Amino acid sequence: MFLERHRGKQTNKEQMKTKALIFTLCIGVGLGLGSCNKDRNEWKDTQTASDSEQAEGIADDAINIADNAARGGSEVARTASPVEQYEAMSGCASITRDTVSVPRVMTIDFGPSNCLCNDGRYRRGKIIVTYAGGGYFDQGSVKTVSFDNYYRNDNKVEGIRTVTNNGRNAANQLSWTINAQNMKITRPDGSFHTWNSTRVRTMLNGESTPTFWRDDEYSISGSAEGINAKGVSYVANITTPLHRKLDCRWIDSGIVEISPEGKATRTLDYGNGACDRLLTVTVRNKSRTIEMN
């Protein structure tokens, strides 16, 4: 009897020790699982990457439209053929140029209703460009790009972009510094993304053919900070210059590193030069491919 009772007491102690050990292991495993879940969730979370890509695309698109609208056409005219003008405007936008007032004003008006442009995107509203002194493309000239109820694919674009012509760099290439202030994109579902950025845009090709936009080619560098559609703040840095040809709808190469607050840095790789709209997002050595807007 004594031996049986003694064994029973030992068994209870062992059970208590076992329960304590299991509890400790559960805590450790739980933390491990939590960490794994966090890694997996961060890898799946492409909100900041998607917002940053959309911001790059829509904002760069507006600058391309403004630049090409300034290259030709009459004072008040429907845009010319796609060979002579940026295809996004063809058949949709009317361009009005006030060359008397100071500052000068150029208005690119897509109308109050969605118009399907030649690049397959819908646009409506106005892009307004103001500039003072000298020619639009002269060194030192400064132009301001703003928006009046402007939408691209039903995404509303707001904010101010100031573009300063830097003249020629050491490689004899034209470059511009673009400061984006209080930029905001509001999606059809009401969610929105805000940001500020500084970019340097360098023309690699196309200067010698000012009325033919298809051979225009640019390199883009710089940084940005913003708040994504989920309310998470972030900073972004272009670590490998982005590359854009205007005969392609998307950025085709370059790397951006984005660091959302409280989360791991993610890398956006735009590819190797193929015009394929694919963007690879990498977080903690895990990658996912998304499509650009």
Image (cartoon, helix red, strand yellow):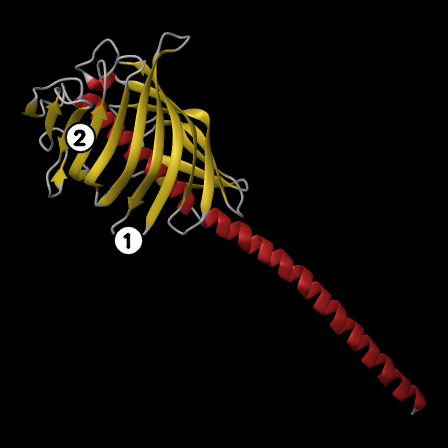
Q: Is residue 273 visible?
A: no
Is residue 66 placed above or below 48 in the rendered structure? above
Residue 194: image location, x then y, percent: 36, 43
Residue 290: image location, x then y, percent: 37, 41
**Which residue is disc 2 drawn over?**
88
Q: What amino acid does circle 1 point to?
A: Gly
- Residue at the spot 23% in from the left edge and 13% down from the top edge: 134
Q: Residue furthest front?
A: 102
- Residue at the spot 36% in from the left edge and 29% down from the top edge: 179
Nearest to the observer: residue 170 or residue 246: 170
User: Relative to 39, is 53 on the left or the right?
Assistant: left
Callout 1: helix, strand or loop? loop
User: Relative to 176, is 284 on the left or the right?
Assistant: right
- Residue at the spot 42% in from the left edge and 37% down from the top edge: 280
Nearest to the observer: residue 118 or residue 21: 118
**Which residue is disc 1 drawn over?**
190
User: Relative to 144, is 25 on the left or the right?
Assistant: right
Q: What amino acid does circle 2 point to?
A: Ala
